[in-house]
Image: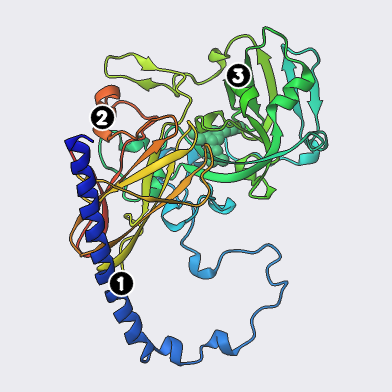
Amino acid sequence: MSKQSRENLDKKAASRRRFLQAGIAGGATLAAAATARAAGDPAITEVQDWNRYLGDGVDAAPYGQPSEFEAHVVRRDVPWLTADPVSSINFTPLHDLDGIITPNGVCFERHHGGTAIIDPAEHRLMINGLVDKQLVFTMDDLKRFPRENRVYFLECAANSGMEWRGAQLNGCQFTHGMVHCVVYTGVPLKYLLEEAGVKTNGKWVLAEGADAAAMTRSIPMEKALEDCLVAFKMNGEALRPEQGYPIRLCVPGWEGNMWVKWLRRIEVGDEPWAQREETSKYTDLLPDGTARRHTWVMDVKSVITSPSPQAPITHGRGRTVISGLAWSGNGKVTRVDVSLDGGRNWQTARLDGPSLSKALHRFYFDFDWDGSPLLIQSRAMDEAGFIQPTKNELRAVRGTNSIYHNNGIQTWHVKGDGVVENVEVS
Ligand code: MTE
Ligand code: CO
């Protein structure tokens, strides 16, 4: 074993010992408060109204809603970001969620022409172009193909795009909230293409939406056959209108803009339909004036969701849970490290819950906070061997004129009073 790695191991052991000692002390603070409460907290000694009076009966809410005390957990937007709400974006309240699944009602929305309201009885999916036979499917037809259930994240390529030039938005909802992760039920696109019979020169598919923006995206045939899904359910229920009801395309691990909502047509061609797409939009301008194109995969990324600016530490020092999300368009996340000192020292976080390819992963780091200011960061690694870069490493390659594909490490400054701010460390 090299001197370096032995030193690392020694450091790790020492930090583990410190953690255990701190854990015992931190536990004591929590236990003391809990013991004091047992001596006479009115919330436990007095009978409360909800303990005394009958509640609503079973039919009060045929479609249930979250508790009224959770009314703050909503999608939010940044009004100055776009001129009009029909071509705009809002953000998932990541700081208030846990686990890996995003509830349907708070999945961020991105529309280029507003939400299309479509009667499924009137909806059709056409397959045309370089195929043996053109086909038009009804919703009933689609539901006769073998179905699959898969959990995927969808991230807009513009997620964290406002942070290229420096820390700007004060909350992970705004810096990282253009992502959601649900269980999709649908038919593999492969089965539909097989039914139509792709001609040998069919190398690309064009997916077209039925919305007013008639959004179209070219996807290489290899990806279409590998894992694309025509989904009609999310988290067990029909897609929400804003997520593409009655059907959307899932393009796992790739930029959100390719996940065409309100999908109405798949055309098979021999080259990408570049001239019909807003190709200039989804490219990354590099410092030398050239551009990066066809950067479809969403690279490995993570963010601490709590504590974060919208989720400050309110319990004071002692036992503290750091919680966050990690994901990669290349497959599974294999490890997440957390730093409390702006990236000088790193400790491995605990991944918890299902670890699924191209899905969100949940991590936790349980520690004892001594009340001193922290610079907290998370750094994810994926099964393809990629490590999430620092923002400065990214800027060295891509400059600051980019909008898309910012997967740099996020820093939150936790102050002594538990208030958290978006900052950058050099
Ligand atoms: N599909 C259609 N038909 N119209 C759109 O405006 N927006 C795209 C994509 N699919 C869009 C679309 C973009 S840019 C993203 S990031 C995702 O949908 C957002 O999906 P969501 O609204 O379910 O979050
Ligand atoms: Co997008």
Instruction: Name which of mark 2 and mark 1 comes first in the sequence.
Output: 1
- From mark 3 to mark 1, how far is it between C-alphas? 53 Å
Q: Position of residue 135 (x, y in %)?
A: 80, 22
Q: Is residue 180 visible?
A: yes
Q: Are marks 2 and 3 in contact (CB under 8 Å)?
A: no
Q: Secondary structure at mark 2?
A: helix
Front position among marks 2 and 1: 1
Q: Residue 296, image x and y in percent?
A: 48, 25
Distance Cα–Cα, label 2 vs label 3:
31 Å
Disc 2 marks which residue? 393
Along the horizontal axis of the image, is 151 left or right of 280? right
Amino acid type shown at disc 1: Gly
**Residue type for callout 3:** Glu
Q: Quadrant of the N terminus?
A: top left
Q: Position of residue 148 (x, y in %)?
A: 70, 38
Ligand 1 shown in quarter: top right
Which one is in front, 271 or 75?
271
Above/below status of 259 relative to 53: above
Check disc 2: other Cα within 10 Å, few if <14, some if 14-19, many if 20+. few
Where is residue 394? Give x, y as percent: 29, 29
Relative to 253, is 337 on the left or the right?
left
Q: Quadrant of the C terminus?
A: top left
Q: Amino acid at mark 2?
A: Glu
- Rendered image: mark on residue 222: 3
Q: CA distance from mark 2 to mark 1?
A: 39 Å
| Res 27 label | 1
Q: Which residue occupies 47% across, 27% down?
A: 297
Q: Nearer the viewer, residue 205 or 99?
A: 99
Q: Secondary structure at mark 3?
A: helix
59 versus 226 height, above or below: below
Query: Dots 2 and 1: beta carbons under 8 Å?
Result: no
- Determine whether 89 is above or below 99 in the image: above
